Image (spheres, rainbow, N blue to C red):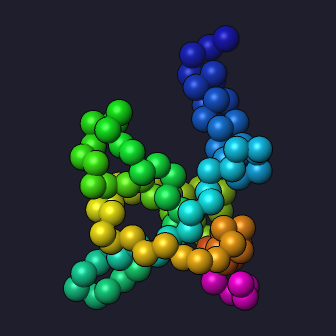
Amino acid sequence: KAPLIKGIYSAIKDLLSAFVGKEKKFTQPVLVKVNNVSNLEKLGFVTREDLIEVGIPSKKVAVYFPHSYAFSGELYIVPAEYITPIDKNSADVMKFILTGGVVNI
């Protein structure tokens, strides 16, 4: 009944259902260029392409980057032109990221 606990519970419940629920959210694996100088790229998952309701211009998308060896990650808003879709099973890509790239996909 406490507002803070309810918010945390809701967020954790939504995150878990995104991984294993009927409405899985991490279905679009992508490679995102995060640094033009060094050509550094990160693997992630597009979580939302329409960000108008958040007040963000339409040429940007939300990409979730899971951390290796942890049940956490970061959400970045990136220009759509920096994203390259990956033609692989999203579960395999997630396994690759979570294990720090030591598993074959």
Left or right of 63: which side holds 67? right
Quadrant into which the C terminus falls = bottom right
Left or right of 66: which side holds 58? left
Q: Main secondary structure of the magenta part?
A: loop
Q: Above or below — where is 105 with respect to 77?
A: below
Q: Does the rendering let one see residue 21?
A: yes
Q: Quadrant of residue 4?
A: top right
Q: Where residue 52 appears, x then y in whole percent?
A: 32, 38
Q: Quadrant of residue 91?
A: bottom right
Q: Does the rendering let one see residue 69?
A: no
Residue at the image position 45 percent from the left and 58 percent from the top: 63
Q: Where residue 7 appears, x then y in whole percent?
A: 58, 25
Q: Above or below — where is 82 with respect to 66?
A: below
Quadrant into which the N terminus falls = top right
- The stretch in magenta equals 100-105
Left or right of 22: which side holds 18? left
Q: Where residue 43 appears, x then y in whole percent?
A: 51, 73
Decide which of 9, 62 is in the foreground and name it.
Answer: 62
Residue at the image position 22 percent from the left and 85 percent from the top: 37
Decide which of 71, 95 is in the foreground and name it.
Answer: 95
Q: Where residue 29 appears, x then y in whole percent?
A: 56, 68
Count of labels shown?
A: 0
Decide which of 100, 76 is in the foreground and name it.
Answer: 76
Asked whether residue 64 is drawn in magenta, I would say: no
Residue at the image position 66 percent from the left and 68 percent from the top: 90
Decide which of 1, 76 is in the foreground and name it.
Answer: 76
Residue at the image position 31 percent from the left and 55 percent from the top: 60
Q: Residue furthest top?
A: 1
Q: Above or below — where is 45 with respect to 56?
A: below
